[in-house]
Amino acid sequence: MLAKKSAILFILFITAITCNFAKTSFAHTTLNEYSVPEAAIEIANYIAGMKTAAIEFSQQDSEGNIAYGTLVIDKPYKFRCNYYEPFPLLILGNKNYISVYDYEMKYIARIKTAENTFNFLLLDHVDFQNQFEILQITEQGNDYIMKLRSITEDRISEIVFDKTLKQLKKLTIFEEDNHIILTFGKHINLADLSGDLFILQNPDIFGPPQRLDQTDLYKKLKIVK
């Protein structure tokens, strides 16, 4: 089964990007002769415009383990990483906490944003340029490929952006002994959604949170026509 650590790393990283990437300055980006500066602007504009959305994804590690889910974003503060069974995690974020519930261990962990390396990810006044460095932007067919380095974690990641469809296509996070590949499917703009998607009550009192399959999840989303 896909490692739980990889899942948490992914959601922290992708939420940091979706919440803050539009604030990045491209003035000091190093581009090779085949790069197109407009690529960075297009990617930033796409992410900045994604206010309330649902993004289907698959997540695979270097051993071939795979999980599926939907990432629901309600900026500036809220997100839900809704993994589908059998993967056992539910990850929620708001202004104060990132909460992780493990259905196997029947355990909830909460990380205060102020105590987390990614404590900048839900704040509006963040100087994102001090957290990520854009290493390279290239064009390959219909895709822009951008490499990023996390300055605090010294971790390299790669974003693939479909310039025709104007949406994220893939994210790869490289670790020393593993790499995590996120392949993004349907991107859905939402007109509204159920507020309880971002609430995780104390499981010792209220029991484990409801596991939502794709049908259950989409019943709580109002899709833009």
Image (cartoon, rainbow, N blue to C red):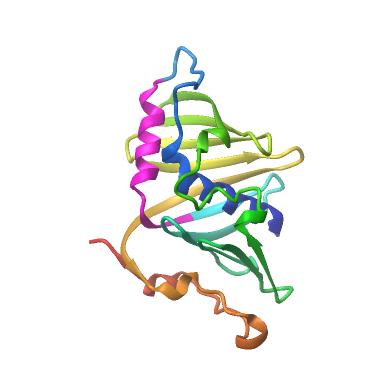
Residue furthest to the left in view is 225
Residue furthest to the top in view is 33
Residue 151 magenta-highlighted: no
Over which residues does the magenta segment extend? 36-56
Residue 70 pos. (x, y %): 48, 60
> Vertical placement of 80 versus 144: above or below?
below
Residue located 35% across and 25% down the image: 38
Q: Who is closer to the viewer here, 177 or 74?
A: 74
Q: Who is closer to the viewer here, 25 or 198?
A: 25
> Vertical placement of 48 versus 143: above or below?
below
Taking the image as shown, residue 57 lies to the left or right of residue 111, namely left
Residue 164, by quadrant, is: top left
Residue 85 pos. (x, y %): 59, 69
> Vertical placement of 73 versus 202: above or below?
above
Residue located 62% across and 41% down the image: 173
Image quarter of the N terminus: bottom right
Residue 186 pos. (x, y %): 39, 53
